[in-house]
Image: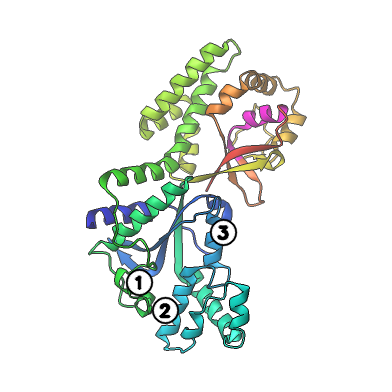
Amino acid sequence: MSEECNTVHNLFNKMKRLHFPFNENEIPLNGIYVLFERGEKAHENDRLVRVGTHTGNNQLRSRLWQHFINENKDRSIFRKNIGRALLNREKDPFLEQWEIDLTTKKAKEFHQDKIDFKKQKEIEEKVTKYMQDNFSFVVFEVPKKEDRLKIESKIISTISLCEDCKPSKNWLGLFSPKEKIKKSGLWLVNELYKEPLSKIDLDVLKEILNNLNERLCRIFYIDTMLHEYTKSNEFNENFLKERLEEIKDSSEKLSIEEIKKRVVSINSNNKRWYERFEQRDFIKKKINVNDLIIESWHNGLDGIFSCVGKSIPQFLEENKNNNVTKSRKNFLLKHFDLIIKYLPVVVKQNNNGKFDVMSGNHRIMASIEKGYSEIECFVIL
């Protein structure tokens, strides 16, 4: 399992790392999280110490909140295990009370006089501080529950079965009263030593992760090529559909390097797009059209140099008589359903809490004309 575990560590160590405090907009609604702990190393990388997911729909953000922020050890077995290790390290007899599950009202009433709630609050705060100071993580989107659970289990088993993936002598988990945690070097007791990732599973995992990183490049390729083919309104729907299919097919078959080369050959300024946003992940999110802003990297949308920083609705209102804007918008309206099918809007959140549009200004204008108040966008992380 050493080779597979090494591959897993390499894959996740290359991804964008999140720390507390984290922006929940950078976390998909459904997916898997992978945790690293300060001071832990394996395979010449930061060592993976926990892999987790969620069962409920759209609950990944909530799960991470329960771990890192919500001070209730009975809502997070991870928090409970950190507390166990901290208390056991100090040989603190409060460990016996920490083990009591107070989730239900009946349990709280029954143990009311047996629990030192002031001490429990102190330990919860220590757990929070340890977690926020020592853990970082990466996340990736897996929409389907059954896929999440399968991938999570196989990653955990791959790590636990690896002979080269061991905790440091100072790892807090070595003080855990749970033998499985001490032995595995993971903050886990379930899914250990089961079916690991096969070569095929690793290829699937790579595809999931690479899709996040590469899809933006392929989208921008489609956008650029479509713009080249549709500068005039002389296309009929059938020709446009054929052309779109052709562009989409080539976007899937060409290497990323070839895609970049073709896009930059059309317009050298496009090189900046790839330099700024390659190897970035993204999440899907519906955004109010008034929060979509023309980004500063534009040299002037439709030749209008005062457009930077304006919302798309404001720009559209101020320039409704601009011939270039009208022509492009009307073309997109005419072929709206077809083009929107292939080309999502790509944005990046700015420091003002709004979203700079990196690709799709005219598609947003057409959507506004269609009566949309919110648009599903790919938000670059």
Q: Quadrant of residue 236?
A: top right
Which badge, 1 or 2, comes first in the chain's sequence? 2
Residue ID at (73%, 34%) = 313
The residues tagged by marks 1 and 2 sit, at their Cα atoms, a distance apart of: 10 Å
Q: Residue at the spot x=51%, y=45% of the render?
A: 282
Nearest the viewer among 140 and 115 is 115
Residue 289, how many percent across, how many down? Answer: 69, 38
Please name the amino acid that badge 1 sits on.
Ile
Q: Nearer the viewer, residue 155 or 309?
A: 155
Q: Quadrant of the N terminus?
A: bottom left
Q: Nearer the viewer, residue 41 or 108?
A: 108
Q: Which residues are magenta?
A: 357-369
Marking on residue 62: 3
For residue 21, say whether it is visible.
Answer: no
Residue 204 seen in render: yes
Q: Is residue 368 magenta?
A: yes
Q: Residue at x 45, y 70 (%)?
A: 134
Residue receiving disc 2? 85
Residue 167 vertical position relative to residue 367 in the rendered view, above or below: below
Whether pointer 1 and pointer 2 mark residues with C-beta atoms closer than 8 Å, the reply is: yes
Label 2, label 3: how far apart the Cα atoms are:
24 Å
In the rendered view, would you say 218 is above or below 169?
above
Q: Position of residue 227 (x, y in %)?
A: 54, 23
Principal secondary structure, stretch drawn in magenta:
helix
